Amino acid sequence: MLWLIARMCCAFFPSCFLRELCFRRGSLDAKVYNIRKSSQGVSAIGNLFLDLDHINVQTRDLEQSVQFYSEVLGFTLVNRVQAGSIKLVFLTLGGVTVELSEAGAGVSYQDGVIEHFTIRVSDIFTAVAVVKNQGLELVTPEPVPFEPTYRYIFFFRGPSGEKIELVQL
């Protein structure tokens, strides 16, 4: 019965934070994260925010940066991705991943050379509901599919204006 009520809620309220749980999984089960309703609204505890996924660094010359990070600093090249006109290179060192992106000549760094950092989440739709409840600036209004590297991505700004990305594998 609870499942039916939750499905009806999601059908009538498209912004319902349970939408992804109801329609992707087909039911609400014991794996639902510890969601707490407080005077401030929805907040999450438990295993929703998992770990730091990567730090993005914008470069002027991607190949020169790849060579520097690999040969001088000892990073290991993990993956190269072409996302539209943007070239991305992922390198790791000691369990930390750096994503290099090429900004190109004459492009200013709106958010700085370190453009954003990324947190991997177990359920992006629930995590976005938690973020939206905080009243923070949203860079993307909803999670966006971003294959082949991630199932979904979502950007917002932290309380000091820092850009943060959430990803779900």
Image: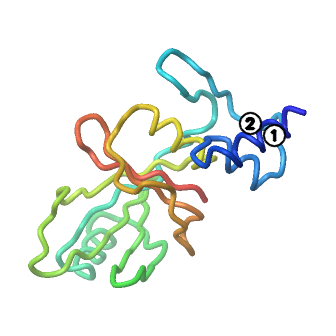
Residue under label 2: 32
Q: Are marks 1 and 2 in contact (CB under 8 Å)?
A: yes
Closer to the camera in the image, 67 or 101: 101
Identity of the residue drawn at 82% across and 34% down: 30
Indicate the amino acid at tag 2. Answer: Val
Instruction: Determine if residue 94 is in view.
Output: no
x and y, in percent, of residue 141 in the image = 43, 54
Closer to the camera in the image, 153 or 16: 16
Closer to the camera in the image, 52 or 169: 169
Indicate the amino acid at tag 1. Answer: Leu
Q: Residue furthest right?
A: 1
Quadrant containing the N terminus is top right
The answer to whether residue 73 is above or below residue 84 is above
Residue under label 1: 28
Q: Nearer the viewer, mark 1 or mark 2?
A: 1
Q: Which quadrant holds residue 100?
A: bottom left
Instruction: Determine if residue 120 is in view.
Output: yes
Colour scheme of the picture: rainbow
